[in-house]
Image: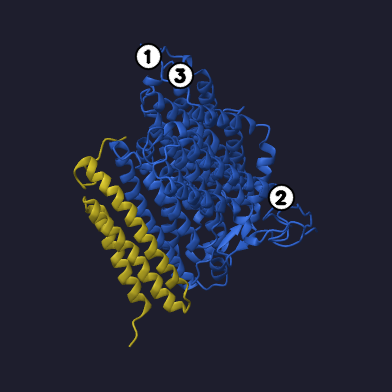
């Protein structure tokens, strides 16, 4: 083992630290030249920060940081193949934060989406007064989401969650003179404040039942029987925690903010919230329930399995999301409800856990969130492009766009078919693994058969409304007077859309390694 | 005579329910914010009482964090309510209703 290049333990948090530093850098830039109209410089700083964060996270994954068999804290540079060298996860600040493969996996998702949003915002936010503020809020929210991926105690989870939420409220309402944006910001904030109050009350009850806030200590207390007398309080606390997570992941019963917030928010922010924020919500959901409340011992204390709650939530969420999406006329609202539906798919990852298994289904949920990060961000950025050109908001208004923008419309076809889960694209593979995982879990819990059936039925239904958009842009006749010039081709938006489309396709041959990483990460936290 | 832990929990639960009731019935955005503050402080009572009960300081320290975060949340919330007033000339949360499904 060479110690030529040894990093301290906290360096494992580099992806989040880079994002935080970039946000502060933007503040410094803004305070030095507050009147600066050099939007290119500001947007490039933001995009560069997100890309550096992405590069560090990918490097750490490849170097095996936090993986099984790597000496904790050292050899971030060198891959050490020493099986049995100990638990790989690097825990920082007395176990308050933990960097393992799952944390890095979600840091990748967050930074990719942040980079795409930063690049596309360059065009979308042109002419807006608060450039540096916009980008630093974006990066602060991304820092929060990145920290959520690593949070390993209810304290850090709550702080990271608020760090992600507070800038998001401001970002949704950033078009201060636009009534839709303000309304969206208000609704997002009100529901967010309510759900975080419920969440923190849930934390206080879990603390009351166990006396700990650190996730492993909670599990140890429950295992040792320390919470046996407080089964009711613990159960109520867990239920309230689920409420908080449901808000962050936009799933039933706290999903109704999503269509409003996404419709009113600037489209890149809608992309950011629906992809990165949702993924970050899921990573803490996965970590809390796999680490702090091990299925078997928690069942003994609270009297019923928490997987049942997730089975119901998964089925209801995907059904509500897809049926509501099918009735929409507004493209952005359709995408918003579809994102609720996808939260239901990802929730299968927890519903399918069993006492001695579930790596496949949990890994599949993580893969789905990664693929979703590309295809959904791309879809929202296409809406951003349409808004940039001043095309209307409904399916009708999108008719015949392909004659004006064939490349973007080809990309949107990729996103839509991938979201629907049509075979040649990334979205098919993650849904396929989810389906396989559900079937596997059905061996011990027959309710999972219903979940698997709901997954298939909902995917089939979703093809209806996704293909409606593809039909509108490619097949329908253009709206009359449609061949007027929209005012140029925005480079940033196009770059982001094309990159997201390429990644959605490239994930097809690249799905093997992605699946390996995700399933490894899932089995590491299920130990 | 010491006060039992269950009294604290009942107090905090009552406070939480008052806050929740306010959230569900009040139409004024500022009253909504105050109700949310009640709910957050209900959690703080719990945290501090349980910290005393379990004999560790984790809960008390976390209560400090919660207060700071509640203040931050109010700051952002008031900013949003301010732009709400500028756009709609009202702080009634039911007035902005352009978006419905």
- Above or below for A11 versus A396: below
Task: Point out the residue furthest to the left here.
Answer: B89
Describe residue A263's horizontal placement relative to residue B57 as left or right: left
Q: Which residue is tagged 3?
A: A473
- Disc with the residue nearer the chain's start (2 vs 1): 2
Disc 1 to disc 3, C-alpha distance = 10 Å
Dot 1 falls on which chain? A
Dot 3 falls on which chain? A
Disc 2 to disc 3, C-alpha distance = 43 Å
Q: Which residue is nearer to you in this view: A98 or A418?
A: A98
Q: Which residue is tagged 2?
A: A63
Mark 2 vs mark 1, foreground winner is 2
Chain in yellow, by letter, is: B
Judge the density around disc 2: few (<14), some (14-19), many (≥20) Cα neighbours within 10 Å: some
Describe residue A195's horizontal placement relative to residue A499 as left or right: left
Q: Residue A301, image x and y in percent?
A: 50, 66
Q: Which residue is nearer to you in this view: A2 or A190?
A: A2
Give the number of marks: 3
Q: Residue A257, image x and y in percent?
A: 36, 43
- Disc with the residue nearer the chain's start (1 vs 3): 3
**For numbered disc 2, what is the local secondary structure?**
helix
**Residues at badges 2 and 3 in contact (C-beta under 8 Å)?**
no
Residue pictured at 58% horizontal, 45% vertical: A366
**For numbered disc 3, what is the local secondary structure?**
helix
Question: Do tags 2 and 1 sit on the same chain?
Answer: yes
Res. A400 in view? yes
Judge the density around disc 3: few (<14), some (14-19), many (≥20) Cα neighbours within 10 Å: many
What colour denotes chain A?
Answer: blue
Q: Which residue is tagged 1?
A: A479
Judge the density around disc 1: few (<14), some (14-19), many (≥20) Cα neighbours within 10 Å: few
């Amino acid at each position: 083992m060479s110690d030529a290049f040894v990093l301290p333990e906290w360096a494992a948090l580099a992806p989040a630290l880079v994002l935080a530093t970039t946000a502060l850098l933007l503040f410094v830039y803004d305070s030095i030249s507050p009147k600066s109209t050099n939007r290119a410089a500001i947007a490039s700083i933001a995009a560069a920060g997100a890309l550096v964060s992405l590069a560090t996270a990918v490097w750490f994954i490849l170097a095996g940081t936090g993986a099984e068999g790597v000496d904790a804290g050292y050899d971030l540079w060198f891959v050490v193949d020493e099986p049995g060298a100990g638990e790989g996860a690097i825990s920082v600040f007395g176990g308050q934060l933990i960097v393992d493969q799952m944390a890095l996996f979600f840091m990748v998702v967050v930074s990719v989406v942040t980079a795409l949003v930063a690049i596309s915002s360059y065009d979308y936010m042109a002419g807006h007064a608060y450039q540096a503020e916009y980008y630093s809020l974006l990066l602060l929210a991304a820092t929060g989401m990145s920290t959520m991926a690593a949070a390993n105690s209810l304290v850090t989870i709550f702080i990271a969650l608020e760090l992600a939420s507070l800038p998001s409220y401001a970002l949704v309402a950033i078009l201060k003179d636009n009534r839709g944006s303000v309304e969206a910001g208000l609704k997002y904030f009100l529901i967010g404040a309510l759900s975080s109050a419920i969440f923190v009350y849930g934390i206080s009850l879990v603390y009351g039942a166990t006396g700990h806030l650190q996730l492993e200590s909670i599990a140890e207390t429950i295992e040792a029987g320390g919470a046996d007398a407080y089964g009711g309080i613990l159960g109520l606390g867990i239920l309230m925690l689920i409420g908080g997570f449901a808000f962050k992941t936009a799933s039933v019963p706290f999903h109704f903010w999503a269509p409003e917030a996404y419709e009113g928010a600037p489209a890149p922010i809608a992309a950011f919230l629906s992809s990165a924020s949702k993924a970050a919500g899921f990573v803490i959901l996965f970590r809390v329930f796999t680490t702090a409340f091990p299925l078997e011992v928690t069942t003994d204390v609270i009297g019923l399995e928490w997987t049942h709650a997730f089975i119901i939530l998964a089925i209801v969420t995907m059904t509500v999301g897809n049926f509501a999406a099918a009735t929409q006329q507004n493209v952005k609202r359709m995408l918003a409800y579809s994102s609720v539906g996808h939260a239901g798919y990802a929730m299968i990852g927890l519903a399918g856990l069993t006492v001695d298994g579930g790596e496949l289904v949990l890994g599949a949920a993580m893969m789905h969130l990664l693929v979703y990060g590309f295809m959904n961000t791309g879809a929202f950025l296409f809406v951003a492009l349409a808004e940039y050109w001043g095309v209307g908001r409904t399916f009708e208004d999108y008719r015949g766009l392909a004659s004006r923008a064939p490349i973007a419309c080809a990309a949107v076809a990729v996103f839509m078919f991938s979201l629907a889960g049509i075979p040649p694209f990334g979205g098919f593979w993650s849904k396929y693994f989810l389906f396989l995982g559900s079937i596997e879990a059905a061996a011990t819990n027959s309710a999972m058969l219903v979940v698997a059936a709901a997954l298939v039925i909902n995917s089939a239904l979703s093809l209806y409304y996704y293909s409606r958009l593809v039909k509108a842009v490619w097949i329908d006749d253009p709206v009359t007077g449609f061949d007027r010039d929209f005012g140029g081709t925005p480079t940033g938006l196009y770059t982001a859309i094309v990159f997201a489309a390429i990644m959605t396709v490239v994930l097809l041959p690249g799905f093997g390694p992605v699946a390996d990483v995700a399933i490894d990460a899932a089995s590491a936290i299920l130990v | 005579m010491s006060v039992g832990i269950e009294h604290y929990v009942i107090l905090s639960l009552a406070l939480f329910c008052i806050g929740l009731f306010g959230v569900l019935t009040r139409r004024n955005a500022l009253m909504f914010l105050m109700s949310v503050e009640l709910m957050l402080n209900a959690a703080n009572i719990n945290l501090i009482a349980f910290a005393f009960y379990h004999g560790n300081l984790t809960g008390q320290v976390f209560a400090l964090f919660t207060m700071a975060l509640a203040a931050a949340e109010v700051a952002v919330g008031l900013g949003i309510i301010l732009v709400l007033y500028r756009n709609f000339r009202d702080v009634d949360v039911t007035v902005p209703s352009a978006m419905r499904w």
